[in-house]
């Protein structure tokens, strides 16, 4: 079993995005967009064909620009980024001391 977590804004490396999630009953991956599941004890792999053609970074940039120009509420408030960074710090600290850590 393995876990890889990355958190960065600019990494100066080739564009790469991987997301995979698997469980005992089902799973999914991002590229290509696939759904893995069992229905009535039969395995079923479903490949999705997304209709949205705009790339994810374009959607993020469009939303950010709309937040600034049109003063709409941001879907990803700064507070969420701070929480993610605290979690990353907790993971690193836990690995360093070899036991769980807590934070507020």
Image (tube, rainbow, N blue to C red):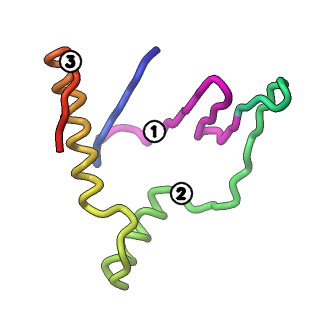
Label 2 element class: loop
Mark drawn on residue 55: 2
Give the percent coordinates (x, y) of residue 84.
Answer: 28, 45
Mark drawn on residue 97: none
Label 1 element class: loop
Give the percent coordinates (x, y) of residue 67.
Answer: 35, 76
Tell me which label, 1 or 3, sits earlier in the chain. Answer: 1
Which residue is at a point 82% across and 32% down the rendered structure image? Answer: 39
Which residue is at a point 40% across and 39% down the rendered structure image? Answer: 14
Label 3 element class: loop
Which residue is at a point 19% across and 33% down the rendered structure image? Answer: 102
How many marks can you see? 3
Tell me which label, 1 or 2, sits earlier in the chain. Answer: 1
| Residue pointed to by mark 1 | 16
Distance between the alpha carbons at the discs numbered 1 and 2: 13 Å
Residue 30 located within the stretch drawn in magenta: yes
Residue density around tag 1, few if under 14, some if 14–19, many if 20 or more, within 10 Å: few
Above or below, comparing residue 63 to residue 80 in the picture: below
52 lies left or right of 65: right
Above or below, comparing residue 3 to residue 51 in the picture: above
56 lies left or right of 75: right
Above or below, comparing residue 99 to residue 101 in the picture: above
In the rendered structure, which segment of residues is drawn in magenta? 12-35
Q: Residue furthest bottom?
A: 70
Residue density around tag 2, few if under 14, some if 14–19, many if 20 or more, within 10 Å: few
| Residue pointed to by mark 3 | 99
């Amino acid at each position: 079993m393995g876990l890889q977590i990355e958190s960065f804004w600019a990494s100066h490396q080739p564009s790469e995005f991987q997301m995979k999630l698997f469980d005992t009953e089902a799973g999914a991956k991002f590229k290509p967009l696939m759904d893995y599941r069992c229905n009535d004890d039969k395995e079923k792999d479903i490949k999705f064909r997304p209709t949205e053609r705009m790339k994810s970074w374009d959607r993020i940039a469009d939303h950010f620009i709309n937040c600034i120009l049109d003063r709409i509420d941001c879907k990803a408030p700064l507070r969420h980024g701070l929480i993610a960074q605290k979690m990353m710090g907790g993971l690193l600290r836990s690995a360093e001391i070899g036991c769980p850590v807590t934070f507020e």
